[in-house]
Amino acid sequence: MIQRIQSIWLLLVAAFCAITFRFPFANGDYLKDTVPASVPLEATTTIWLSIITVVTGALGFVTIFLFDNRKLQLKLCYLGIFLSIILLSMYFIEMTNFGNSVIALWCIFHFAILGSYILAARGIWKDEKLIRSMDRLR
């Protein structure tokens, strides 16, 4: 449901993933055939960055609507955390292809994806714990 806080966190994940297509993670000189070209490192730089960014954002958006099945929702949040860690590591690996690269301020969105997934998982876990305690009282 939208009134649960983890739904807001998951919606922010989808929004941050969409924003990363517009704003760069880093700026630098891309070394192609020993000729440097000044380009930004963003989600559209390589196909793998694009695919993982789309999957991470879509996973966050789809997970919002699985509020009836909290265990599956929690597993998908853990998968999203794993994918966002892979995405961050791919960005840092891709930065090795850049000469004189400087991390941009906009990289905060990439770290916000990971943080939002963690906060959503924490909210889902708290809901699950609350439901279990209510079942014990019946």
Image (tube, rainbow, N blue to C red):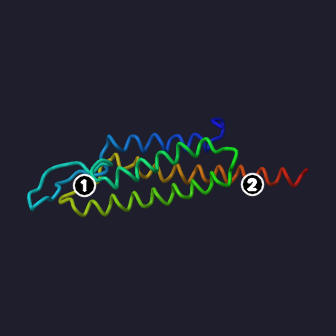
Q: Judge depth for marks 1 and 2 and give the one in front.
A: 2
Residue at position x 32%, y 42% in the image: 23
Residue 114: x and y, percent?
48, 53
SS assignment at label 1: strand
Residue type at numbered disc 1: Val
Corner quadrant of residue 3: top right
Comparing 105 with 56, the one in front is: 56
> Mark 1 vs mark 2: which is more N-terminal?
1
Q: Is residue 90 above or below residue 4?
A: below
Rendered-image quadrant of the N terminus: top right
Q: CA distance from mark 1 to mark 2?
A: 43 Å
Q: Which residue is mark 1?
A: 102
Say which quarter of the image contains residue 125: bottom right
Image quadrant assignment for residue 31: bottom left
Q: Residues within 10 Å of mark 2 (few under 14, many from 20)?
A: few
Which amino acid, by three-letter code, is at mark 2? Lys
Rendered residue at 53%/42% (across/down): 61
Residue wearing tag 2: 129
